[in-house]
Image (cartoon, helix red, strand yellow):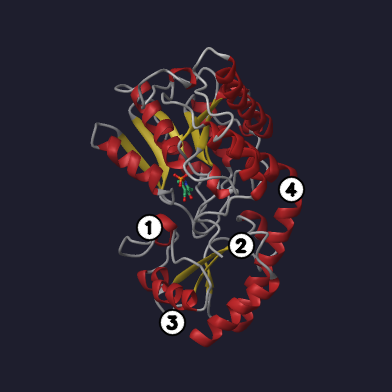
Amino acid sequence: MDNAATTFVDSRVIDAMLPYFSEEWANPGGNYYTSKRAKAAVNNAKEVIAEIIGAKPSEIYFTSGGTESDNMAIKGIYYGNSPYRNHLITSAIEHKAVLSTCNYLKNQGASVTVLPVDHNGFVSVQMLNRAINRRTSLVSVMMANNEIGTIEDIKAIADVCNKHGVYCHTDAVQCFGHIPINVNNLGIDMMSISSHKLHGPKGVGAIYIKEGTKIHPIIHGGGQENGLRSGTENVAGIVGLMAAAKLAADNMENDYKYCFRLRNYLADELKAAFPDCKINGPDPTIDGNGLKRLPGNLNVSFGSMNGATLVSKLSERGICTSSGSACSQSKKGPSHVLTAIGLDSHMASSALRISLDTTNTYQEVDYLVTSLKEIL
Ligand code: PLP
């Protein structure tokens, strides 16, 4: 029940990848027939992913995952547009791949505005509008939050950016493959995706970069990916990402409905069992709110036990959950996301994140609720 941290690789994805470890192992940069086949596989993956998000194949660049894509967007725009346009805007609930990158650039001379969010994790478009100035080059606001599942109004955010001529990047790592995304309809310039959140392999991702974007590479070398991301392409990984994206797109409607209902069932059961618990992020037990957060995501504070202790007690019963994001488990102190939505440190430290997938069952949810009753 920690599918926001990562997902298993679908056997159909593995099948699609296998030939690229054995027969089709050539370097896509070569000039002979086997290389051309490897290159064709990479190009085909660009076409498939581009079609899913409404982009052009030439606007898709493969990376090593969400973290690299976020770094590439933020550092790439900063290096391509500073020193004059050195102002970056982001939100308080971003993943560390965005926040730490902005902080790093701050030490190099960037001016960074971190927008606060409301009690459900939403960025205010009015506040964003006021924060943009003549030196702003980039706004980076995530499409869906990894801890509380809040789905931001990226179209409204991109509209403000376009009005001011400012680049708009969104980290869609948690929602690509789970909710429909069309980059043109949204009006964004860049979008980060990662394969391992949708049953693809780890260590591969992509970034959509709109044609004409003034961006510098952050990895230099052999000039692959149109000079923007050097390094021999991870052909098997790229094929895996493509296969996972295709499966996710084909099954999205049913998968969405299943996870949505299972999550709402869990929320109802928890509220019945623990009337004082607090659902963090848009409360799906309130009409219309379920649509405002990722379908399988629930984040609950019980107040009575530390989240890390709860996670370990659930683990003893064979249940895998988390008390924050996977990457912040080792970090001391309450989650920056929960603090940003206004939780005091006691409630923020007692949060449990449950992220469900289509392979989770109603029986498993019942077992979780029973276990929580016994533990708490
Ligand atoms: N951004 C978000 C919102 C995430 O949830 C994650 C992973 O947890 C990342 C970025 C980093 O992605 P990756 O693990 O592919 O580097």
User: Which label lies toward us, 2 or 3?
Assistant: 2
Q: Which mark is residue 267?
A: none
Q: Name the kind of residue labelled 3 in the image.
A: Ser
Query: Label 1: which residue?
Result: 328
Q: Residue, x 66% and y 68% (percent of image)?
A: 285
Q: Extreme top residue here?
A: 31
Cα gap from disc 4 to disc 2, whole angstroms: 16 Å
Disc 2 to disc 3: CB gap under 8 Å: no
Q: Which mark is residue 304?
A: 3
Disc 1 to disc 2: CB gap under 8 Å: no
Query: Label 4: which residue?
Result: 251
Query: Label 2: which residue?
Result: 356
Q: Which residue is more in the foreground, 23 or 281?
A: 23
Disc 1 CB within 8 Å of nearest ligand 1 atom: no
| Mark 1 or mark 2: whose residue is earlier in sequence | 1
Q: Name the kind of residue labelled 2 in the image.
A: Leu
Percent across and percent down for residue 332 are 30, 64
Specify the quadrant of the image occupied by residue 362.
bottom right
| Mark 4 or mark 2: whose residue is earlier in sequence | 4
Q: Name the kind of residue labelled 1 in the image.
A: Ser
